[in-house]
Image (spheres, rainbow, N blue to C red):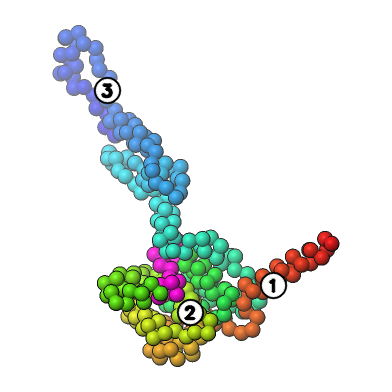
Amino acid sequence: MERFQIPAPILDKLRESGASQLPSFDSAEYEARRVATMNAVQGHLTDYNCDRCKNRGYSAELRDGYIVSVECPCMAIRRSIRRAKESGLGELLEKHTFSAFQTPESWQKRAKQIAQAYAADPDSWFVASGASGSGKTHLCTAICRRLLADGRAVRYVIWRDAAREIKAAALDNAAREKLVFPIRNADVLYMDDFLKTATGEVPTKADIELAIDVIGARYNAKATTILSTELSVDALLSLDQAMGSRIYECTKSGARFLSIAGEGRNWRLKQQSQENQEVQQTAVGSV
């Protein structure tokens, strides 16, 4: 940096007037002090504590004689946290991780492998089909967790809740469109318990029409879509041939369609049963 001094003619006049010589002015030192002062300011960003920028989200730096604002690396973390909150997944993201998914049986290992492969390269759709308690939601949430970390914006929708609200607005086109639009156009859409109904009931005509609407829009947009459902491929096709075939096609003709069917695959129920047995054994042993 250039060091500025008082010009000689001015110094001569100062000497003649009896004034003392003023010290030279170092612009580099001055700018450095300004940068240090700016970087000492405490910011007000929340959700993550960053010692580097003191929660401002940026740091001041001196480049080529100019003070510039540089985004702090913590902003990537803050955006990820914000996306997680906006996704609607909430606490599910904390416990439903790939590392927490237990794989004592071969079908669980295979399910986890397929889900992890998709999370690493989400170039199609992912569908987890199977009975309640088989780990569908766990794996789908673990995928979303990875996508959020990669910078994707995920929207989590519980089918029954969304369908109920949208159907209630059936007579108000503007209100219905306001509810459906963000589902159709989400960067990544995760619909949990897709087309699930109460026990003994089947999807209504309105349910199927809504499903066709959403699936059709995302199919045309080639938008990343994740579904968990208790319905098999055949069941989806029986509800609507076009919708079912589109879902199957978008999973690379079944390569990303995870079917967790068969006896004994309600892992949640099995775990609860084992826990109850352990409690009973402990109670007997203490008598």
Q: Is residue 94 left or right of residue 249?
A: right
- Mark 1, Cα crowd under 10 Å, few <14 / some 14-19 / many 20+, is few
Which label number is shown at residue 196? Answer: 2
Q: Residue at x 62, y 72 (%)?
A: 268
Give the secondary structure at mark 3. Answer: loop
Asked where in the image residue 276 lies, by quadrant, the reply is bottom right
Which label number is shown at residue 24? Answer: 3
Q: Earlier in the sequence, mark 1 or mark 3?
A: 3
Q: Residue at x 40, y 67 (%)?
A: 155
Q: Is residue 168 left or right of residue 104?
A: left
Count of number-bearing discs: 3
Residue flagged by tag 3: what amino acid is it? Answer: Ser
- Mark 3, Cα crowd under 10 Å, few <14 / some 14-19 / many 20+, is few
Q: Quadrant of the C terminus?
A: bottom right
Membership of 25 in magenta stretch: no
Q: Residue at x 44, y 64 (%)?
A: 88
Q: Closer to the camera, 3 or 83?
A: 83
Membership of 160 in magenta stretch: yes
Q: Are marks 1 and 3 in contact (CB under 8 Å)?
A: no
Q: Residue at x 54, y 70 (%)?
A: 138
Q: Earlier in the sequence, mark 2 or mark 1?
A: 2
Please provide the residue range marked out in magenta. Answer: 146-163
Give the secondary structure at mark 2. Answer: loop
Q: Which residue is mark 1?
A: 273
- Mark 2, Cα crowd under 10 Å, few <14 / some 14-19 / many 20+, is some
Q: Closer to the camera, 64 or 283?
A: 283
- The answer to whether any part of residue 90 appears in the image is yes
Q: Is residue 125 above or below residue 87?
A: below
